[in-house]
Image: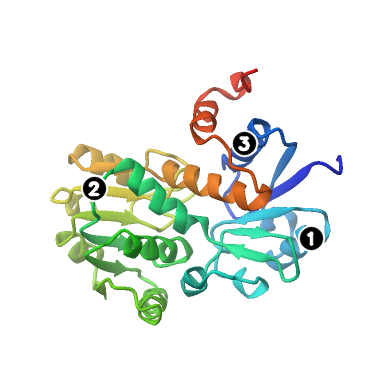
Amino acid sequence: MSDATTRLGLIGDNISRSQSPRLHVLAGRLCGLDVTYERLIPADRGEDFETVFDRCLVEGFRGINVTYPYKERVVPRLTVRDSAIAAIGACNTVVFDKTPPAGYNTDYTGFVSAFRESFPGAAPGTVAMAGAGGVGKAVAFGLAALGCERLLIFDPDTAKADALLSSLKAARVEMPVEIAPSIEEAAAEADGLINCTPLGMVGYGGSAFPTSAIGRQRWAFDAVYTPVETKFLADARRNGLSLLSGYELFFHQGVDAFRYFTGADVDAAALRALLAQPKAEARIPA
């Protein structure tokens, strides 16, 4: 590997279909950079998360993305400079620029950008959100930045829901937040529905929202992007809701992460067009 190569990677479970390697390699080509990007699955390597992370730290990686279920687990190993991200308590982007390495949350910035681009001029209204883990925290803070009127959180792991509520209160966000007794009750009062659980992801079937709970709302967002068309989004589409897919979060967070990794601003429109092409046909225009 050349000294000029930017070595990147992704640590997570169930990431065999992740499009992050393709996004970052193509972004690198658009910016004239030689980028490699590796999938690092702890279970497949017979190692725990910390061992894989430490290998990246010493084996020449410029940075890594971190996904489910390690976004909160990585935080104690990082320096988090942004107060909003420190309040979120989860990071998905790590840059090995110093010790400890720097942690960022491009799920947070990416969600805000994706919502504004997909629903220009719209406000979230009242939102029912399933899942209060790493991505749920980022999206909740993003909703606050977007002017959400009220957030209703449901997670069967009540400790996660309580922790998110505490984080939002500690950050003094100007957004009423409640823990809902069930996702059905939360959805009944909502303008928007958000899935921040792994349900619907490859390897995790089903939907966090019963079909009967979908219909009165205006919009829906699913953080899952493999597959892009989840059961939840299919149900929402059939009921006439406007959709924001997990692919949009994936794309915008990836553009932000690439900037942190390389310092380069990729042409987002050109990158989107390349990603839409079949792999064999994705060539950088001369």
Q: Secondary structure at mark 3?
A: helix
How many numbered discs, if any?
3
Residue 37 appears left or right of 55: left
Q: Which residue is mark 2?
A: 219
Q: Is residue 33 above or below residue 162?
A: above
Q: Nearer the viewer, residue 66 or 185?
A: 66
- Is residue 104 depicted above or below 35 in this figure? below
The answer to which of marks 3 and 2 sits earlier in the sequence is 3
- Please report whichever mark, 2 or 1, sits nearer to the chain's N-terminal start: 1
Q: CA distance from mark 3 to mark 1?
A: 25 Å
The residue sitting at 35% across, 62% down in the picture is 145
Q: CA distance from mark 3 to mark 2?
A: 30 Å
Q: Is residue 216 visible?
A: yes
The one nearer the camera, 177 or 114, is 114
Residue for badge 3: 27
Quickly name the residue at label 1: 55
Which marked residue is nearer to the observer: mark 3 or mark 2?
3
Numbered circle sitting on residue 138: none
Q: Quadrant of the N terminus?
A: top right
Q: CA distance from mark 2 to mark 1?
A: 42 Å
Residue 47 found in image quarter? bottom right
Estimate the x, y position of residue 101 in percent, counting from the top left.
70, 66
Check disc 1: other Cα within 10 Å, few if <14, some if 14-19, many if 20+: few
Hey, which quadrant is residue 34 in on the image? Answer: top right
